[in-house]
């Protein structure tokens, strides 16, 4: 019998069979007369009442998170806690059925003195069972409403499965695609990460956390994890205070403003003070400057890792550093449960610090309604997973996330009679789920080939050949692929990454695909047949060898379970592609870091590489359409504005082609000179809208000068510079003057 099953049986033996799930408050003899049990009392009063009743031991246990069930994240060796204490604050729940969770919860409610419910968390990153495109792909939709809705679906499936709290959204700005976790965030831009992160928080948490279909969100990884040196995971990050404020903190500020219930502290060492013991970020910024009232959970083992990072002497010291910095809940280091009592005894941690941390945890539990509804109602998987509307949304998000990077006229595919469908990703199922696939099921995946069969099968003969595997050096499949290519009018070649090649602990020194995939494409190119390259990957790739061989390139990302119709529709022209890159594709790995919002050097004509271009292959915001758009001039309500004033900007956009299309208008600002140098341009607003063929839509940006045209200095104070400021939209510019 495997360890997991044994654990489950042991747990089930711990608690009596659950009667009809009692949504009652009666537990361990405590009834609603007790103030903290009374739902009609304000939460803060309930928190204080409960806190004063708690022993030190009970308080400490609320600040611990263990795991329940088999840990499926191989990067953290899963320690199954076979004897879970009834007083534990939280569990990472790896199950999908309410029953196991409810039996564990009953153990807490009925075998602890105060009956404090356990908070069950899980990594619901881009779906629970209905798996959506990876977050980086979602950012390429530039559709925050679609992202909000996808997170609402994830929350519904998670909450109905026994999960109250997701460790998402990840809003780590990342400039280095060697770092595999770029897949999990929203790209290279602070404003974009903030906009999508806030949308995700609204989706997960809905209108009220005590709604039975919402979950608590968790902004992660706080902060600067995306700056990991050379793209290696978990390592040191050199981040100046100025960069901390104008790049890495901004998305978290937006997420806190959106009402995120929790934050996860990061592994990385932030210029000498690791994120999980960094009082400046955890207390000075998060609590004192932003007024965050939720709680901070550490990343897995991050407290214990303070020792390895040479910041703590031992585990007890690590726990003291963490909690005194403002980190509230210890995920799996066992620093708090083992040593916090002694630290309190010794005065290394004071009671106020302990009480504040417990208050924050209890506050979220009350907000979630866990005291009134500690159990997850039993429900059928049919009612819970893969709802028709959820699948339709997954298809929409996939459609809007895919980016047409190159098209020499090969697309859309019209009038083709013979199509060769080739490559290791053509029939891949698991490969399309991407990292953090949660409870995504390979059998739920609609593979690309099936989508092509449905879209083209009635008008076109198809031949399939895998050609090669993702990697390795087995070229024995090339012959069959070449034969199919020679037979066909067009080759649709599916290349890319495995799901596990991006995400946590997946750093790569090169972002080029494996050699075997290059050889396959180069061999197919020798047939002279047009190649439409479809990529499925979790990070920007180095494509300088493949790009010249392709007549067209579609970046399909890892679309989750429902991307096949979207891809096939783009190939046929049924769908007009509308995705735009949220992250730069370097021409070469050697260019990294390379991103759009760079600072300008002192020499615009020098300082370039001598061995290759200094330009990326594809830039932030790139993406082609099957139609064309023409932008009119930007107009402004005024061209002179007070630094505390507002401005209304407009730009007309005309669809000059013969196909309806969704266009994203990006509004950038550029300060020609400032006290603290600014990037050559910064995204400050974006809007996506359908524009019918031949019609014109007017896009607007209502500018709050201080917020949108200012910037944070190294202390987080918003600075607005008097003088010129240029507004940039596509190839249009407007200069305005900011006055005192
Ligand atoms: C992991 C990840 C974090 C995740 C946590 C729980 O190590 O860094 O993103 O939420 O542990 O699985």
Image (cartoon, helix red, strand yellow):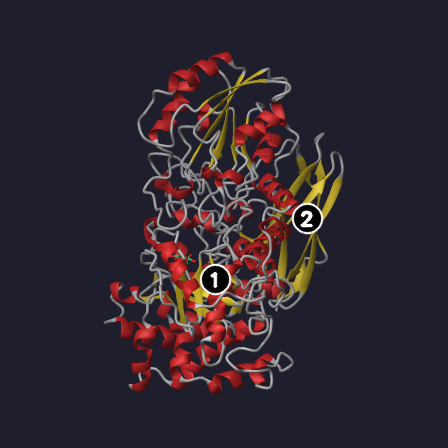
Q: Is residue 361 visible?
A: no
Query: Residue 377 appears in which quarter of the rendering?
Result: bottom right
> On the image, numbered disc 2 is attached to which residue?
634
The image position of residue 291, as x and y in percent, is 53, 75
Please state which of residues 613 and 662 is positioned toward the viewer in this rendering. Answer: 662
**Secondary element at image label 2:** loop
The image position of residue 345, as x and y in percent, is 31, 86
10 Å crowding of disc 2: few (<14), some (14-19), many (20+)? some
> On the image, numbered disc 1 is attached to which residue?
121
Indicate the quadrant of ligand 1 in the picture. Answer: bottom left
Q: Is residue 349 visible?
A: yes
**Secondary element at image label 1:** strand
The image position of residue 659, as x and y in percent, is 70, 31
Mark 2–mark 1 CB contact (< 8 Å): no
Q: Is 101 on the left or on the right of 476, as rendered?
A: right
Q: Is 651 on the left or on the right of 598, as rendered?
A: right
């Amino acid at each position: 019998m495997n360890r997991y099953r044994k654990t489950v049986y042991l747990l089930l033996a711990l608690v009596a069979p659950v009667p009809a799930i009692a949504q009652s408050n009666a537990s361990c003899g405590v009834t609603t007369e007790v103030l903290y049990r009374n739902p009609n009392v304000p939460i803060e009063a309930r928190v204080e009442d409960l806190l004063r009743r708690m022993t030190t031991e009970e308080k400490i246990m609320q600040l611990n998170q263990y795991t329940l069930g088999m840990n499926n994240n191989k990067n953290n060796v899963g320690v199954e806690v076979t004897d879970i204490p009834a007083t534990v604050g939280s569990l990472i729940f790896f199950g999908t059925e309410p029953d196991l969770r409810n039996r564990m919860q009953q153990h807490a409610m009925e075998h602890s003195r105060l009956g404090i419910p356990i908070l069950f968390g899980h990594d619901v990153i881009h779906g629970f069972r209905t798996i959506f495109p990876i977050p980086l792909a979602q950012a390429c939709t530039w559709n925050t409403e679609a992202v909000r809705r996808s997170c609402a679906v994830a929350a519904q499936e998670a909450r109905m499965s026994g999960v109250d709290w997701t460790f998402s959204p990840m809003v780590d700005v990342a400039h280095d695609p060697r770092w595999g976790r770029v897949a999990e965030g929203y790209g290279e831009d602070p404003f974009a990460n903030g906009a999508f992160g806030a949308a995700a928080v609204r989706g997960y948490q809905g209108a009220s956390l005590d709604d039975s279909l919402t979950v608590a969100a968790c902004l992660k990884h706080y902060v600067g994890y995306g700056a990991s040196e050379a793209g290696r995971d978990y390592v040191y990050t050199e981040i100046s205070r100025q960069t901390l404020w104008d790049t890495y903190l901004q998305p978290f500020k937006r997420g806190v403003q959106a009402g995120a219930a929790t934050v996860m502290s990061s592994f990385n060492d932030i210029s000498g003070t690791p994120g999980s013991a960094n009082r400046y970020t955890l207390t000075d910024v998060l609590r004192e400057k932003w007024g965050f009232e939720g709680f901070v959970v550490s990343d897995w083992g991050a407290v214990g890792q303070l020792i390895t990072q040479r910041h703590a002497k031992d585990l007890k010291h690590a726990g003291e550093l963490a909690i005194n910095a403002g980190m509230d809940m210890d995920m799996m280091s066992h620093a708090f449960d083992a040593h916090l009592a002694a630290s309190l005894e010794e005065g290394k941690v004071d009671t106020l610090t302990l009480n504040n941390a417990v208050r924050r945890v209890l506050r979220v539990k009350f907000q979630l309604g866990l005291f009134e509804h500690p159990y997850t109602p039993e429900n059928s998987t049919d009612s819970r997973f893969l709802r028709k509307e959820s699948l339709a949304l997954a298809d929409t998000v996939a459609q809007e996330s895919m980016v047409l990077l190159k098209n020499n006229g090969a697309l859309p595919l019209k009038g083709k009679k013979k199509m060769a469908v080739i490559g290791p990703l053509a029939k891949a199922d698991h490969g399309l789920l991407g990292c953090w696939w949660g409870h995504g099921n390979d059998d739920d995946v609609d593979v690309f080939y099936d989508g092509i069969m449905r879209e083209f099968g009635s008008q076109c003969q198809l031949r399939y050949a895998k050609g090669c595997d993702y990697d390795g050096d087995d070229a024995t499949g090339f012959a069959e692929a070449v034969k199919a290519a020679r037979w066909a009018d067009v080759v649709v070649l599916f290349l890319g990454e495995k799901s596990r090649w991006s995400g946590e602990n997946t750093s790569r020194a090169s972002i080029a695909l494996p050699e075997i995939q290059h050889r396959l494409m180069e061999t197919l190119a020798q047939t002279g047949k047009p190649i439409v390259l479809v990529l499925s990957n979790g990070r920007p790739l180095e494509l300088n060898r493949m790009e010249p061989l392709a007549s067209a390139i579609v970046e399909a990302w890892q679309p989750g379970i429902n991307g096949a119709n979207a891809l096939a529709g783009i190939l046929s022209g049924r769908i007009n592609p509308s995705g735009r890159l949220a992250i730069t594709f370097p021409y070469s790995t050697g260019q990294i870091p390379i991103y759009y919002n760079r600072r300008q050097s002192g020499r615009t004509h020098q300082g370039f590489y001598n061995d290759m271009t200094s330009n990326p292959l594809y830039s932030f915001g790139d993406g082609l359409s099957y139609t064309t758009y023409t932008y009119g001039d930007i107009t402004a309500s005024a061209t002179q504005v007070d630094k505390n004033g507002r401005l209304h900007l407009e730009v007309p956009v005309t669809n000059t082609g013969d196909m309806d299309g969704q266009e994203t208008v990006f509004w950038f600002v550029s300060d020609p000179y400032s006290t603290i140098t600014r990037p050559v341009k910064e995204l400050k607003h974006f809007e996506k809208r359908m524009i019918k063929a031949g019609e014109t839509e007017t896009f607007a940006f209502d500018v709050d000068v201080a917020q949108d045209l200012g910037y944070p200095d190294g202390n987080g104070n918003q600075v607005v510079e008097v003088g010129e400021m240029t507004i940039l939209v596509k190839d249009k510019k407007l200069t305005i003057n900011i006055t005192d």
